[in-house]
Amino acid sequence: NLAVRGLLWVLPVFVYLRYLDRVDPCVYLKLKKHWLRGVLVGLAFAALIFLLLLAEHGPPRLRAGTITWNSILSTSLLIGFVEEVAYRGFVFQKMCDWLPVKSAVAISSLLFVAIHVPGWLSLHLFMMKTFVFVFVFGVVMAILLLATRSLWASIVSHSLNDFLTAVVFPPG
């Protein structure tokens, strides 16, 4: 699943930027400059998420079934890279070329929610609360990108959020 997303989402972004826009994809996606600032802000934001989850759920509920290579690498850490490159790195920044920033934030965040809806529906997990959370999360990820001028802030935050919610504080 992650390999398919990488091939369908990340590779086309890099190819489009390199050969159609004729720019360095890593520069356009904000992966080169300010990377340390991005990583540090991403870690700080993830620490805030951890504290909020701790306050809401109490101590972590690590279970053997949730700690797998797939849950750690694919579902948690790499998906943040794949989704952030596609949605904040490419879609959001392209929209900023055509629209006011607030509109670009809102539309790219709605698109980010939209990619999650089919999975939620197929697993019978669709809830308005989750819809709103993912939309707000998309807005916050765009703000982190704007504030740090580094996609690494969004990548690290997103990846660690998914790790915390899927592995450290799993549902149920």
Image (spheres, grey):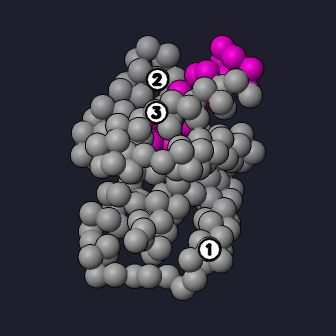
The mark lying in front, picked from 2 and 3, is 3
* Residue 133 visible, this orientation: yes
Residue named by callout 1: 56
Q: Is residue 53 above or below residue 39?
A: below
x 56%, y 50%: residue: 129
Identify which amino acid the numbered label 2 is placed on: Leu
In what element is the residue under mark 1?
A: helix
Which label sits on residue 94?
Answer: none
Q: Position of residue 32 (x, y in %)?
A: 57, 44
Q: Residues within 10 Å of mark 3 (few under 14, many from 20)?
A: some
Q: Which of the 4 quarters of the picture holds residue 139?
A: top right
Q: Label the magenta part by its dominant secondary structure.
A: helix
In what element is the residue under mark 3?
A: helix
CA gap, disc 2 and disc 3: 24 Å
Left or right: 103 with respect to 135? right
Contact? badges 2 and 3 (CB < 8 Å):
no
Q: Which of the 4 quarters of the picture holds residue 70?
A: bottom left
Q: Nearer the viewer, residue 171 or 86?
A: 171
Residue named by callout 3: 114
Q: Is residue 62 above or below residue 88?
A: below
**Looking at the figure, which quarter contains the C terminus?**
bottom left
x 73%, y 26%: residue: 101
Q: Earlier in the sequence, mark 2 or mark 3?
A: 2
Q: Residues within 10 Å of mark 1 (few under 14, many from 20)?
A: few
- Magenta-tinted stretch: 83-101
Q: Nearer the viewer, residue 41 or 108?
A: 108
